[in-house]
Image: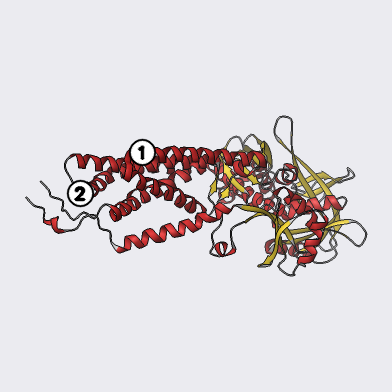
Amino acid sequence: MVNKKQHQPLNRNAIWKYIVLSVSIVILFLSALPSWYGEQASVHIKHPNQTIDVLAVSKYLSQADIATTAIHQTNGQTIIVLQDDNQQAKAKDVMEQHLIEGEVIALAMEPSAPDWLTNLGFAPIKLGLDLRGGVQFLLDVDMEPVYHAHRQVVMDEFRAKVRGSTGRHVDDSVYLSFRSSESLQEAISVAREEFPQWQRAVSNNQLILSQTEEERDALRASTVLQNLQIMRSRIEHLGITEASVQRQGQSRIRIELPGVQDPAAAKDVIGATASLSFHSLVSERSPGAFVINDENGKPVYLNRNAIFGGEHIIDARASIGEMGLAEVNLVLDSAGGRKMSHHSRANIGQPMATVYNEYTQGRDGTSIKNSEVISVATIQAQLGSRFQITGSGNLAEAQQLALLLSAGSLTAPVTIVEERTIGPTLGAENVKNGFAALALGLGLTLTFIALWYRRLGWVANSALCINLVMLVGLIALIPGAVLTMPGIAGLVLTVGMAVDTNVLIFERVRDKMKQGYSFAQSINTGFDSAFSSIWDANLTTMIVAIALYSIGNGPIQGFALTLGLGLLTSMFTGIFLSRVIINLIWGRDQRRMVKI
């Protein structure tokens, strides 16, 4: 019986398939091209309100024996491209000596690709820490001070609202004692309205409040998230543009700083937990009073509830005041400005203390809070969102304090539990070894396929090379994608999986030819019959790649990303591109397929 479709020509592709194929290859090839040119170390100087004399910049750098490739200005910033990557930190130090107020300097990498290519929006692949070199920190967020602060708030609230109440906290619970049953009932009502998230228990005129595990988890998640945001802000102030700050586990933060070889400065800022808080002075016996010594060791009694804290500080700059003393000029956000304005307006002539808080790590690994009153000033007039504080030491100490404050006060203290530094030489060696392994695997694969499948093998090899180019271009297009050493392993694995697609197809073609089909008929049937097997195999692997990316972090995510994208490009080139090439060269056989 002759098939009704026997008069339809075999192995023909619609015009739209050629268009999609051509456009995809061209776009991803252009996206991959900047990675071939690589990157050069550069220094970016942001100056939104003024311009910098390029000739003066060149003079400063040449005097320091720093060679540049180009210096140009665009979008309110000056970009200095260096010839030697090792002079990047030195160039930053030189330019910092000539900065004026409002200018910010940052280290970055500038693409070496031609301008016409970068103007199209294409950029090289971002390299991870293990390939570029740099420093990695693993921080542990200590939640106990946060839990302690919440328990203290509960006790202070009841002391203020319920007469005759005393309290203490043991472990995770707050024990409140009352003189009468009426006070106890009043306290229960307050607890129900003000602290519904706390579990309540009553025993012998005592109200016992305990945080639920769900509330502790929510508080931990919120605290770690706030610390993440503050860490990103601090790193921006350090002038590092390609840093990675991610949560790891329940209460840890992983920070990767590519290109940073001296971790001392980054460690001082990232690991520091200095903050300021502003308190009104009270008498020794006032409810909620607590005592902190000033710089001379004299006790100062303060209201435990701060007027506002360091989270409202949006800018802090150190300078020398009229009296020749170092001072820090603060700028508050709108909420902090309102709090300061309301308090200062109602307390003109009253003292206000500035408290400096810092956490250190004890021998047992616990965080120890050290607080000191650095200044006590009398409010002379209503203050707003801008004012000055003194008592922070000399100018260098004031500058360090200003940097920490402008970068944000950590919600909870952090401890650096792991520090790892990878030199640029080791990073370059990793790149060399990784791509050498990729070249070796690709060369052996291309040779085997060409010898085993002859003419079809050359088609598979062409599709495989285009597949790698498209994969590199796709990684470069995805925002936030970073190529790591495991990512290169994913590239090598992609080579084998892409060949596997062609092997399945070509073996089906061989089987059909052994059954007596013509070459064109075997091509048509082989591609169609192999599709389901290829789809099932790649789908199961894609599920694993998605799971790895979702659960893993860092290098594991890099491997999963490369593997997943490699599956997409290998199916595209192995099924779509290979068939188009084969159809154009050998598939136009005028004989018709006959179904028996």
Q: Residue at x 27, y 39 (%)?
A: 507
Residue 409, position in %: x, y? 70, 50
Q: Mark 2 vs mark 1: which is more N-terminal? A: 1
Q: Amino acid at mark 2?
A: Gln
In the image, farthest residue toward the top? 364
Q: Is residue 590 left or right of residue 480?
A: left
Q: Residue at x 53, y 41 (%)?
A: 435
Q: Nearer the viewer, residue 188 or 198?
A: 198
- Say if 201 sits above or below 186 in the image: above
Q: Which residue is mark 1?
A: 451
Q: Nearer the viewer, mark 2 or mark 1?
A: 1
Q: Amino acid at mark 1?
A: Leu
Q: Nearer the viewer, residue 22 or 538?
A: 22
The answer to which quarter of the image holds residue 147 is: top right
Q: Is residue 202 visible in the rendered structure shown here? A: yes
Q: Which residue is mark 2?
A: 521
Q: What colouring does the structure picture have?
A: secondary structure
- Say if 375 sits above or below 434 in the image: below
Residue 178, position in %: x, y? 66, 41
Q: Which mark is residue 312?
A: none
Residue 275, position in %: x, y? 74, 49
Q: CA distance from mark 2 to mark 1?
A: 23 Å
The answer to which quarter of the image holds residue 101 is: bottom right
In the image, farthest residue toward the left? 1
Q: Is residue 425 left or right of residue 355?
A: left
